[in-house]
Amino acid sequence: MTQIDFYILPDTTLEARLGFACRLAETIYRKGYRLHLHAEDEAMARELDDKLWTFRPDSYLPHALQGSDMAAEVPVTLGWQGPPEPGIDAMLNLHPEIPEWFSRFSRVVEIINQHQDVLTVKRECWQTYKQRGYPVTAHKLPAHGD
C-alpha cells in the first residue's frame, strides 16, 4: 500500500515550498529511488526544472520534463499532466489535488506551507487519503532558529 508523507513547512511562500521540494528530491535521489514531481501546471514544472539546476551550487540532480526525450533515462521527472512512465518509485505532489494514479507509487509526499490556499486543499487531501485507508504520516518542520 502507498505510504503518504506530509511535510509541513513553517514558511508561507511558494519559493520555500519549491526549495524544500528540490532538497527532498535530492535526498530521495541519493537513496537510489526514481521520483516524479507532479506540479500544479506547466509554469510550476518549468520553475522546478530551473530550480533543480540552481538550488545548490555543489549539487546536480539528473532530471527532465515528462514527455521529453530524456524522461525515460533520468531518475527524476517533472510533469503536470498525466502519469509518468512506469518504474518510478515515489511522487512528490505539488498539485492541489491528488492525481487519480497516485497509488502506483510506493511513496507519495505532499508539501504544505502556511499559505491559506495550500492549507485548505491539503487538509482535504489528508482527509481523502485517511478515508481511503492509506497510512499517512505528518512531519512538522521547525521554523528557522527553533
Image (cartoon, grey):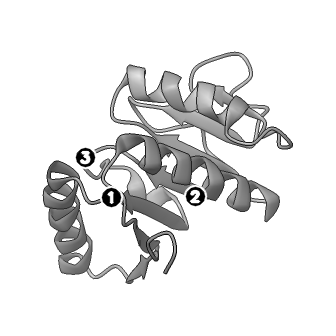
- Type of the residue with mark 2: Ala
Q: Which residue is mark 3?
A: 96
**In this view of the protein, which residue sits in the foreground, 22 or 141?**
141
Horizontal and vertical percent position of residue 15: 44, 41
Please report the residue visible at 61 percent of the width from the left and 47 percent of the height from the top: 22
Cα distance between the residues tagged 3 and 2: 17 Å
Q: Which residue is mark 2?
A: 90
User: Tag 2: Cα neighbours inside 10 Å, few (<14), some, or many (≥20)?
Assistant: many
Q: Which residue is mark 1?
A: 113
Q: Nearer the viewer, mark 1 or mark 3?
A: 1
Mark 3 and mark 2 in contact? Answer it, CB < 8 Å.
no
N-terminal of the pair, mark 2 or mark 1, is 2
User: Tag 3: Cα neighbours inside 10 Å, few (<14), some, or many (≥20)?
Assistant: some
Horizontal and vertical percent position of residue 25: 64, 52
Q: Quadrant of residue 65?
A: top right
- Type of the residue with mark 3: Pro
Horizontal and vertical percent position of residue 51: 61, 32
N-terminal of the pair, mark 1 or mark 3, is 3
Cα distance between the residues tagged 2 and 1: 20 Å
Q: Is residue 18 above or below residue 27?
A: above
